[in-house]
Amino acid sequence: MITAGFIGNGKSTNRYHLPFLLKAGKFRVKTIYNRSLKQDWAPIAGVAYTTDLSELLEDPEIDLVVVTTPMEHHYSYAKKALEAGKHVLLEKPFAKTVAQAEELFALAAQKGVQLQGYQNRRFDSDFLTSLKVIESGRLGNLHEIEMHFDYDRPEVPHAVEGFSVETSFLYNHGCHTIDQVVSYFGKPDRVHYDLRQLLGEGRMNDYFDLDLYYGNLKVSIKSSYFRVKPRPSFVLYGENGCFIKEGKDRQEEDLKRFYMPDQADFGLDRPSDYGILTYRSDGQYQEETWVSEVGDYSLFYEALYESLTGRREPLVQKEHTLTVMEILEEGVRLLEPAK
């Protein structure tokens, strides 16, 4: 068992980490640090809750520190944990700048410990299903991929009065989808950016449309807070056909209603959620329903365990993280007011 401690005790820790860490069955949580002991989530039996960070960092039993604080604190807390000789799992977005990320990786190498970003959405059902379709070869040569991450939440940008990197939609949601693309296709040849502030200049970045180019393939990542009806999650266009997956992975939806991973049907797509593949075969068009892959965020913690115990390379490579950070930083730089 790997002994873990958490820095942060909010929604990220309790909704997106602990249920999956515990499901993996190879970690135990000893200590959770938070600046306040106010509990918005049910405490876990046997876990020590503390407002003293040294209690966590100076504990020789703790191998891994998971940082789940807001993004503006990622760098400082990760640095403290690395300096204490702990492996670190850092929530996304990883850091504010590429320079911060590079400094943290250099420190991890110096200390002989591992540092990874928490890219759990590599185990989203819609993403895994789309990869299966690509690898089936039914589409032939890929021409274009469209990925959408849409919300009907205008109240979010309306509640934010000014622009900041920390509240930008690109940093907070592009970090999911850009990583998915980079994890499979690698570093793009070039990127075209269309970032907007739909409520006006100087307001929150609430829309982005990025085109990542890989030779003749274009991968478009599009997101908005102002979509009454969301666009399909994935659309794949190839020389021989197309694949459309309308709905997103259902794990987050289940978590929000406190339907947890210990349920057998947690996060599973229904037949009505399956994607449709249309392709040309022997001069005729065929259409078939493609059964969804099973999404499971606990597989991230399975992979983390394997890397921490030396059985495999880290799932989220340093190069992946730095590429994502470069794309994020360049995007918001285009929006920041001139100094």
Image: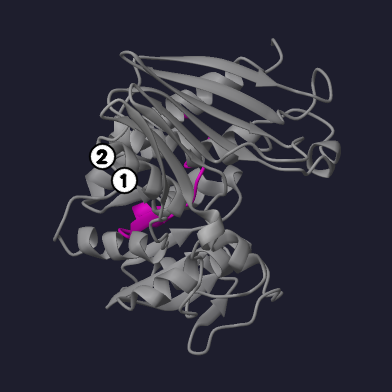
- The vertical placement of 2 against 8, above or below, is below
Badge 2: residue crowd in 10 Å (few <14, some 14–19, many ≥20): few
Residue at 41% over, 39% down: 180
Q: Which mark is residue 132?
A: 1
The residue at 61%/14% (across/down) is: 334
Which three-letter amino acid code belongs to the residue tagged 1?
Lys
Q: Determine whether the residue tagged by mark 2 lies in a helix, strand or loop.
A: helix
Residue 198 quadrant: top right
Left or right of residue 223, residue 29 in this image: left
Q: Is residue 92 magenta?
A: yes
Horizontal side, residue 282 vs residue 97: left or right: left
In the rendered image, residue 332 lying in the magenta stretch gets the answer: no
Q: Which residues are magenta?
A: 80-98
Q: Residue furthest top?
A: 338
Answer yes or no: is residue 154 visible. Answer: yes
Which of 196/261 is in front? 261
Q: Which mark is residue 135?
A: 2
Residue 129, how many percent across, how many down? 39, 48
Give the crowd class for mark 1: few <14, some 14-19, many >=20 residues within 10 Å: some
State yes or no: discs 1 and 2 in contact (Cβ < 8 Å). Answer: yes
Q: What mark, if any, has residue 71 been given in the picture? A: none
Q: Is residue 127 above or below residue 22?
A: above
Indicate the position of residue 281 as horizontal and vertical percent values: 28, 31
Asked if residue 159 lies left or right of residue 217, the reply is right
Quadrant hosting residue 63: bottom left
In what element is the residue under mark 1?
A: helix
x, y percentage for residue 83?
A: 35, 52
Residue 272, above or below 257: above
Q: Amino acid at mark 2?
A: Glu
